[in-house]
Image (tube, rainbow, N blue to C red):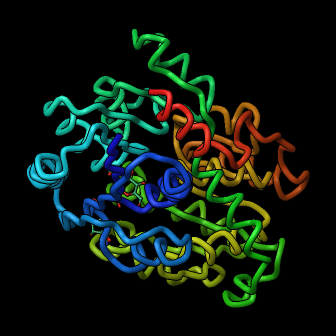
Amino acid sequence: MKILNIVGARPNFMKINPIEKAMSRSSLEHVLVHTGQHYDERMSSTFFDELGIPRPQINLEVGSASHAVQVAEIMKRFEQTCLKEKPDMVLVVGDVNSTAACSLVASKLEIQVCHVEAGLRSRDRRMPEEINRLVTDVLSDLLLTTSPDADENLRAEGIPAEKIHFVGNTMIDSLVMQLEKAPEKESPKRFGVIPGEYAVLTLHRPSNVDDPAQLERILGIFAEIQNEVPIVFPMHPRTRNNLKTFGLDRKLSELKHIVITHPLSYLEFLDLYRQSRFVLTDSGGIQEETTYLKIPCITLRDNTERPVTVDVGTNYLTGTDPDTVLGVFREIMNGGGKSGRIPDLWDGHAAERIVEVLEKW
Ligand code: UD1
């Protein structure tokens, strides 16, 4: 069986990494295809180097554009790839534009689609990722899930049970692999903060950073928090561009206890958040990684497609109301936050289970 493994954007790389490795130990023929949705060294190639992912055999080099243009460009180029490579299956991960675009191409060419991280639902269709999840899942022949709530979502949408397999979380596989290899390093020192006495912030969701009033309101929250605990903020290019366009970059630079840095590599970031007091984020994957490491996480969103991180993990879903965020901040500072446990099958072996499912398929 020949499988095309698809990656496009930063959060895809750590999800495909263990799958590529497990497939290399199996009889499955696999080809890694990068759509080029993310292309900067710091958003892409550094992850391949650090995680030891082989270089993609095919790069479609689509780059950034509006959603429609980006998806259309991926589809045009990926159709040619499928015609040339003639795979039996296309395996997609996560919920980025590349995930949905490649699924659509494959299914129209009658190539089987396997979706890793299927069934997550925020029920917020203003999120581009939610649209990508819905489109991808409806087209998929094999739906591999990270948590039982995802299985329930898929069954409620009428997906036959035999297509759904609860395999665990490949992003956590990558984390487990790297934790074994990477002793704590000096990230806090590099940013002038003391282990256990700082917060880490990431922010890039369009709903938080594309509207000037919303972005300014959120900056007000960070202004309060940094008065009590320093914040290290690796900044996504979307956020950096918008702060500049909206003239908010100066306001941010006045906050003396926020350390701004470029997007970090996987190991630099891991080293930074694992030694932090808590994390502030609007990312999906970071909600999972902090749950695994039992670090309190304040999620600056009104909903999450990963409810298991709130129900059993250390995640708090606060939205962006200042009083709510600051209330949870105080709870963490005074009481340490929730204790949490690691969700089922987040054990470092999800990719092996995926290969087993594929071999039986
Ligand atoms: C994409 C994903 C999002 C994921 C995020 C992680 C979609 C719909 N969104 O959002 O789910 O959480 O990646 O980063 O697929 N840019 C660069 N260098 C790059 C890539 C992008 O500078 O290598 C800049 C460009 O100005 C671009 C902007 O970032 O226009 C946004 O990039 P894009 O891929 O459109 O979406 P993300 O916000 O990164």
Q: Is residue 300 above or below residue 109?
A: below
Q: Residue furthest right?
A: 335
Across and down, in percent, residue 44 comes to 39, 71
Across and down, in percent, residue 205 comes to 41, 53
Q: Which residue is located at x 40 percent, y 36 percent?
A: 115
Residue 248 in view here: no
- Tell me the quarter of the picture where residue 307 sits: top right
Across and down, in percent, residue 104 comes to 20, 36
Q: Depth check: 26 or 138 in front?
A: 26
Q: Is residue 272 above or below residue 310?
A: below
Image quarter for ligand 1 equals: bottom left
Residue 74 in view here: yes
Q: Depth check: 216 or 148 in front?
A: 148
Across and down, in percent, residue 283 comes to 52, 53
Where is the C terminus found, in terms of image quarters?
top left
Q: Which residue is located at x 36 percent, y 51 percent?
A: 5
Q: Which residue is located at x 46 percent, y 18 percent?
A: 154
Number of callouts: 0
Where is the N terminus found, in terms of image quarters?
top left
- Tell me the quarter of the picture where residue 150 sits: top right
Q: Depth check: 266 or 65 in front?
A: 266
Q: Is residue 105 above or below residue 240?
A: above
Task: Name the side, left or right, on which 79 lies relative to 315.
Answer: left
Q: Which residue is located at x 82 percent, y 73 percent?
A: 197
Q: Is residue 18 above or below residue 224?
A: above
Task: Name the side, left or right, on which 81 lies relative to 20.
Answer: left
